[in-house]
Image (cartoon, rainbow, N blue to C red):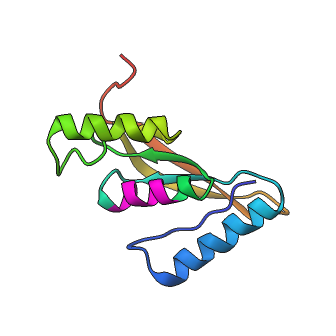
Amino acid sequence: AAEFVAIVGAPRADIQKLERVLDRKRNAGETPHVTLVGGGWNGVALALELNRRGCDVTCMFPEVLPLARYLPKFICEHLAKKLKQKGIELLPYAKVNYATRIDSGRHGDELRVHFVWTFDARC
């Protein structure tokens, strides 16, 4: 079952809670999966760090490419290629509407993320 840890602005207490959840998953023989909302500087840095620590990572963001608000397109394309090579799943054009917490029983809560495509990326 999934466990929900919200990290806004990377406060130390939330990072420590996330580390405890990841350790618990690893000790149970599971590969932790983390979904990050945002493709900015912090989102990309956290995606790479979690990937380095052995997590499966999905990064969703409303732009066409990670860091597209900050860098030229050719650099963003190169970065996206490198992230995908590392096994990080990218969901561009994805805008989160809201999240619903679901009581999943023995493992705590599960989080269902409801999002919309800001552009039909599947075409």
Is residue 44 part of the magenta span, yes or no? yes
Residue at position x 75%, y 60% from top?
26
Left-right relation of 87 to 29? left
| Range drawn in magenta | 42-49
Q: Is residue 33 visible?
A: yes
Residue at position x 71%, y 51% from top?
31
Where is residue 42, by image quadrant? Answer: bottom left
Is residue 37 part of the magenta span, yes or no? no
Percent coordinates x, y for residue 20 in the rendering: 68, 74
Quarter holding the C terminus is: top left
Residue sitting farthest toward the left: 72
Please tell me whether residue 81 is drawn above or below residue 66 in the rendered image: above
> Which sits in the foreground, 108 or 44?
44
Q: How many marks?
A: 0
Residue sitting farthest toward the bottom: 13
Percent coordinates x, y for residue 14 in the rendering: 53, 77
Please tell me whether residue 119 is drawn above or below residue 88 in the rendered image: above
Left-right relation of 101 to 47? right
Residue sitting farthest toward the top: 123
Percent coordinates x, y for residue 88 in the rendering: 50, 42
Dominant SS of magenta comes to: helix
Please tell me whether residue 109 is drawn above or below residue 14 in the rendered image: above
Q: Is residue 92 visible?
A: no
> Which sits in the foreground, 10 or 104?
10
Percent coordinates x, y for residue 15 in the rendering: 53, 75
